[in-house]
Amino acid sequence: MLTRACAGALLLSGAIAAAQAPAPRATNVVSGCVERFDPAADYFPDKTTIEDAASFTVEYRRSYKVVTVKEAYVGGPAEHYVLLQCGAPAPALTGEFAGAQVVPVPITSLFVFSTTHLSLLTDLNRMDVLTGVAQRDAVIDAQAEARIAAGKVVEFARAGLQIDVERVVSTKPAVLMAGGTPTPTLSVIKAAGVPVVSNTEWLEPTALGRAEWVKYMALFLNEEREAQTQYAEMKGRYRALSARAVARPEGERPLVMTGRSTRGQFVIAGGRSYVAALIKDAGGRYAWADNTAVASATVDLEAQIQRAANADIWINGGGWKSVQAMLEDEPRYVAFKAYRQGQVWVYERRQKPDGANDYWSRSVTHPDLLLADIVKIFFPRSFPDHVFEWYMPVPSQ
C-alpha cells in the first residue's frame, strides 16, 4: 500500500510533469518555430482533406507532412516533399521518401514562377511571404503589385522566362514554386540548396480540382484551416450555380467551341480539360467532348470546321482586337456560325495594356465566378444580374 507521503509525492511529481509537458496544440503553427519539441505532440491539428484535386496528395505525421505531386510535369514521375514543422528534428526518411526535399514550414519566403500561384496567396491572406516573381510585367494582383512597388519582391526570370540562377541562389527563398516544366536550371537551383516544388494545377481535369490547389499552397504555410473553409464556401456556390445551369432543357443548351487557329492548326481545350468540364457544368455541349487531352490539344482547321461550324458559342480564343482582326488572322473563321453571329468571347476584360491578365491569376481560385461568367454567356436572359468578371465579346470594331 502507498503511504500518504508516497501518494502525495506521486501526485506532486505528476503535477510537475503535467506543468512541464507542452499542452496539446489547438491550431497549426502559422508563424515561427516550435521552441520546445515534443515527440508525442501532433503539430498539425488542422488537417486538410483533398476532395476534387487529382494531382496531389498529403500524408500527415506528428511533426511533418509528406506532399506528393503525382506528375511533376507532363509524363514525368511523382515528386515527394517533406514539410517539416520548424523546430522539429529531421525525420529519418526511407523507401520512396528517401532523398525527398525537406522544407521547414511554415515557409517565410516564396518565389513563384506563374501568376496563377499569386491568387493562392491572396486568398489565404499570406502575400507577406512573396519575395520573388518570374516577371513583374505579368503581375496584375494588387497585393503582389504593392509588394513589388515596396521593393520586397525580386524579379528572377525576366528575359524569356529564363531563370537567373545566381539571383535565386543568392536570395535563397524558402521555396521556389515552379510551373511543372522540367529544366536543367531547376536542378542546379535544387543542388544549391533551394527547394523547388512543382505546381501542376493546370493539369487538373476540373475547375474545382484546379482551385483546390489553394490547399496545396496552404500546406507550406500551415494554413490548412483557412484553406478548408474558403474552399468549402466556394465549392458550395459553384455546385449551386451549376445545378441551375444543367437543369436547362437539352434543346436550350448551346454547342460550344474553343481556341484559335495558328498556321492552319487549331489549338483547342482538351476534352478532359478543366475548360471542357466548365462548359459541361455551365450547361453547354462541347464540340470536342470526346477528345482525351487533359490540357490543350491541336487539330486541323478543317477538322475544327467539320466539328464546330454550327457551334452557337466560341470561347477562349483571345488576342483579337476586333472581329475584323480575326479575319485578318484567319479568313476561314467566317465558316463558323459563332463568328457570323457575334458570339466569340474572350477572357480579356481585366487586362493591363502590357498584357497582364487577371484571368491567369484570380480565376484559378474563383471558379464559381468563372462559371458564372460562362453561364451568363450561355443563358444571358436567365442570369441578368451577374456582372462579367473576365469574359467579353470580341469587339465589332
Image (cartoon, grey):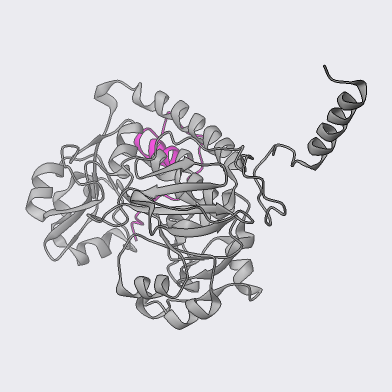
Is 226 in front, or is 69? 69
Give the x, y percent position of residue 18: 79, 35
Outermost residue, right side? 5
User: Magenta residues?
Assistant: 369-397
Q: Judge from the rendering whether residue 350 lies leftward or rightward of residue 246; answer left or right.
A: right
Query: Could you tell me which residue is drawn at 60 percent across and 38 percent down?
Result: 46
Query: Could you tell me which residue is drawn at 58 percent across and 36 percent down?
Result: 229
Outermost residue, bottom side? 166
Q: Judge from the rendering whether residue 35 lies leftward or rightward of residue 341; answer left or right.
A: right
Query: Could you tell me which residue is drawn at 25 percent across and 55 percent down?
Result: 74
Give the x, y percent position of residue 259: 24, 53
| In magenta stretch: residue 288 | no
Give the x, y percent position of residue 86: 62, 56
Query: Could you tell me which residue is drawn at 64 percent across and 44 percent down?
Result: 28
Give the x, y percent position of residue 233: 55, 33
74 up-or-down from 379: above or below: below
Image quadrant for the N terminus? top right
Is 177 in front, or is 122? 177
Outermost residue, top side? 1
**Can residue 350 be seen by looking at this rendering?**
no
243 up-or-down from 127: above or below: above
28 up-or-down from 283: above or below: below
**Can residue 160 be seen by looking at this rendering?**
yes
| In magenta stretch: residue 381 | yes
Is 264 in front, or is 73? 73
Image quadrant for the C terminus? bottom left
Q: Judge from the rendering whether residue 121 lies leftward or rightward of residue 260; answer left or right.
A: right
